[in-house]
Image (spheres, rainbow, N blue to C red):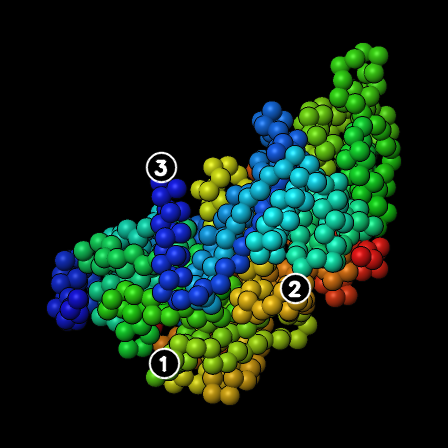
């Protein structure tokens, strides 16, 4: 398979959607988008006042979200509607939908933006989808309950967790073949990778840890464990993770332990634990990385963390069972 | 051949293919022993879907777990297999067990009433094998009848009663009317609840025996109205292992009081309505396999296979003694899709686990309830704690 040439594909995508003008005007609105599983909506907050601007109706059970490469659109998984809804940031509404198969949860873009890789929890598959043609290009069979999906830095590797098989599948994006199955911790959830792509970090929800994978050899390199004060190990359930662009700091949300761990990537040391809301899962950095948005699934709010002081600036109520935040800043 | 059989064939074929490619792949086989006729799964009783009866034999739970294990098995060069064997009684099951043991099977799921489990366990003491009790909730199997090689993935009566007692305490429904049936099993359930009441400070204001009868000469024992008249109480606990009487108790009490125990609200290892911790995906895989809802024994069979697979994976399919040490040890993480890391109690080999407190179509709470604390693991507020254990295998 030849790789499609990026600019032409993207241009075609934008033109075919007829959104060119609108998209161009919608840059850097500052809006904060939060998907709410039980509201079938994405809540839009103003980036300064954090007041609700709008609740955008989506398909059922919206979960993972990402900005398109040109930052004009937000892609959001609507799990129970088995599709990805595309929100136009200028219009603040869903402008089209892409069918993605049964019970999708998380996804990632191919580096050229032409495809998305979606984990289908029920089918134990990863769907490869052409976002322009709205077509399933391939289905890759993986272990039960695939969840976290990450396209590696150079685009040649796709990483998928299986929550049930306790492994990370390493997949060649050119052939869609599984190159390696790496056994990690229990109930592996989500990913982050270092800027040079040499390490892939995966959170283990049971086991209070993150497994660090050597992305060249596809083996486990190290395990980082979390022990915030006052919590038994069994109550520390890491799920969300994000890394700064310089690859120095990782933020790991600890679920039931209601904290975010701030990890020094080089030394694997936990620098700080920040108290946030109930069942912290999603973690998103602002573009200048001065603020971390943590999504608290069971307290229906988000915590805004100042990354200089590691203090929560404020918590903001959003919809019911919030899942993921993205920031258009 | 239906499509499911085809998928199975394809699965087997792909595993075989893998085995050929990998050379000498090791096989870990599970034995599944059940009675020819087990009254607990009597369809004529199951049809009314009372909360205290299983919805069917739990074999499908083991099948789902086996299917989930194929990828991780491939990664470590081990394939898993499941063999089902039946017999009329304990001696017949023992003969089946011996046959399978001679073929190299070491891990046996036992789906049988408590008496049969006790006989099998006692007859296989000291052998190189493990038994997993997936459907007998009898407290005695964890106490006087316990064995070093007998593991329990189904919660016992004491755990269920403790979970409900915690719920009643949390609700401040402290005064309980206990209705108890005539069967031996009903008495076990009633006794477990009386223990829990003492443990958590509930008051059993009255205990009445019931019979399932329309005989006017026995109407004091058979009529729910008469049984529930008299002094006040906050809640009715029905100890009815059969369930046919219990199903007519809610809404038929003289006082407007909730019913728990065998109907109304129960404490179970699993409930199809549990929405968290990946449960809907498991429930849905099970429903595809069995074409019915998933219940406690189904979960117990599923998690027994999962526990062994986890030990095989993490020890690199170590020799039996080492594998057992890991399986029963403190380090293992058994993922029961109930939010907590599960592992076996070292004093009686009961799997510690949260219980789901549920109605027919909703999970109301998860026990241990918030506020019920334990010095090492809050899950040990359910059932026999170390200090309560009389298990000396």
x, y percent for residue A282: 46, 66
Query: In this image, B97 relative to B377: left or right?
Result: left
Query: In this image, B183 relative to B101: left or right?
Result: right
Tell me the chain of label 1.
Answer: A
Q: Residues within 10 Å of mark 3 (few under 14, many from 20)?
A: few
Q: Circle 2 sits on which residue? A: B324
| Nearer to me, B141 or A40 | B141
Q: Is residue B267 visible?
A: no
Q: Are marks 3 and 1 in contact (CB under 8 Å)?
A: no
x, y percent for residue A289: 41, 79
- SS for callout 1: loop
Q: Residues within 10 Å of mark 2 (few under 14, many from 20)?
A: some
- Residue placed furthest toward the top: B216
Between the residue at mark 3 and the residue at mark 1, the CA separation in whole angstroms equals 44 Å
Q: Circle 1 sits on which residue? A: A216
Query: In this image, B102 relative to B377: left or right?
Result: left
The dot on residue B1 is: 3
Callouts 2 and 1 on one subunit? no
Quarter of the image where one finds residue A27: bottom left
Quadrant the N terminus of chain B occupies: top left
- SS for callout 2: helix
Tell me the chain of label 2.
Answer: B
Tell me the chain of label 3.
Answer: B
Callouts 3 and 1 on one subunit? no
Q: Which residue shows up at 54% across the image and 76% down it?
A: A261
Q: Which residue shows up at 63% across the image and 37% down it?
A: B87
């Amino acid at each position: 398979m030849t790789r499609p040439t990026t600019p032409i594909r993207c241009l075609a995508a934008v033109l075919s959607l007829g959104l060119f003008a609108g998209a161009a005007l919608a840059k850097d609105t500052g809006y904060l988008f939060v998907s709410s599983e039980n509201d079938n909506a994405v809540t839009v907050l103003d980036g300064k006042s954090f007041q609700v601007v709008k609740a955008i109706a989506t398909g059922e059970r919206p979960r993972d979200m990402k900005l398109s490469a040109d930052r004009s659109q937000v892609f959001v998984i609507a799990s129970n509607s088995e599709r990805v809804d595309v929100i136009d940031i200028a219009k603040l509404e869903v402008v089209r939908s892409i069918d993605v198969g049964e019970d999708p949860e998380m996804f990632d873009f191919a580096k050229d933006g032409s495809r998305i890789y979606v984990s289908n929890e029920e089918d134990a598959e990863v769907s490869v989808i052409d976002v322009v043609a709205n077509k399933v290009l391939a289905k890759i069979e993986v272990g039960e309950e695939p969840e976290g999906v990450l396209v590696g830095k150079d685009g040649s590797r796709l990483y998928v967790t299986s929550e049930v098989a306790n492994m990370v599948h390493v997949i060649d994006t050119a052939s869609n073949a599984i190159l390696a199955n790496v056994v990690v911790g229990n109930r592996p959830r989500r990913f982050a990778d270092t800027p040079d792509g040499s390490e892939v970090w995966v959170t283990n929800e049971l086991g209070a840890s993150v497994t660090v994978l050597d992305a060249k050899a596809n083996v486990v390199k190290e395990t980082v464990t979390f022990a915030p004060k006052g919590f038994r190990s069994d109550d520390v359930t890491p799920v969300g993770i994000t890394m700064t662009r310089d690859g120095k700091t990782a933020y790991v949300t600890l679920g039931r332990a209601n904290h975010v761990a701030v990890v020094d990537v080089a030394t694997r040391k936990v620098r700080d634990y920040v108290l946030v809301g109930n069942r912290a899962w999603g973690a998103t950095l602002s573009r200048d990385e001065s603020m971390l948005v943590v999504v608290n699934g069971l307290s229906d709010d988000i915590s805004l963390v100042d990354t200089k002081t590691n203090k929560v600036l404020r918590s903001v109520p959003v919809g019911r069972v919030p899942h993921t935040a993205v920031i258009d800043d | 051949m239906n499509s499911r059989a085809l998928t199975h064939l394809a699965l087997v074929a792909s595993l075989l293919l893998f085995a050929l490619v990998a050379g000498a792949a090791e096989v870990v086989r599970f034995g599944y022993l059940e009675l020819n006729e087990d009254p607990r799964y009597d369809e004529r009783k199951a049809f009314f879907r009372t909360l205290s009866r299983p919805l069917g034999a739990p074999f499908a739970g083991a099948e789902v777990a086996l299917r989930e294990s194929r990828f991780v098995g491939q990664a470590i060069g081990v394939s898993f297999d499941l063999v089902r064997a039946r017999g009329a009684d304990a001696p017949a099951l023992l003969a089946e067990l011996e046959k399978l043991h001679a073929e190299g099977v070491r891990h046996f799921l036992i789906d049988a009433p408590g008496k049969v489990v006790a006989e099998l366990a006692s007859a296989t003491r000291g052998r190189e094998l493990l038994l997993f009790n997936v459907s007998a909730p009898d407290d005695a199997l964890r106490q006087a009848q316990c064995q070093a090689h007998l593991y329990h993935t189904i919660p016992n009566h004491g755990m269920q009663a403790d979970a409900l007692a915690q719920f009643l305490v949390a609700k401040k429904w402290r005064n309980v009317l206990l209705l108890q049936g005539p069967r031996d099993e009903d008495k076990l359930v009633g006794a477990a609840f009386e223990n829990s009441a003492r443990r958590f400070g509930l008051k059993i204001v009255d205990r009445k025996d019931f019979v399932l009868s329309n005989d006017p000469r026995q109407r004091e024992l058979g009529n729910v109205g008469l049984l529930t008249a008299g002094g006040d109480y906050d809640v009715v606990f029905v100890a009815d292992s059969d369930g046919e009487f219990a199903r007519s108790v809610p809404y038929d009490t003289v006082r407007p009081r909730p019913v728990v125990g065998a109907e109304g609200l129960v404490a179970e290892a699993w409930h199809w309505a549990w929405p968290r911790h990946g449960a809907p995906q498991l429930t849905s895989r099970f429903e595809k396999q069995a074409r019915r809802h998933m219940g406690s024994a189904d979960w117990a069979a599923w998690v027994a296979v999962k526990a062994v697979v986890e030990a095989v994976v993490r020890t690199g399919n170590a020799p039996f003694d080492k594998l057992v040490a890991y399986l029963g040890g403190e380090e293992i993480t058994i993922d029961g899709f109930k939010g907590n890391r599960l592992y076996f109690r070292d004093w009686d080999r009961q799997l510690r686990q949260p219980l789901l407190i549920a109605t027919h179509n909703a999970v109301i709470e998860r026990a241990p309830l918030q506020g019920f604390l334990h010095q090492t693991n809050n899950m040990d507020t359910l059932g026999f704690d170390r200090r309560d254990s009389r298990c000396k295998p």
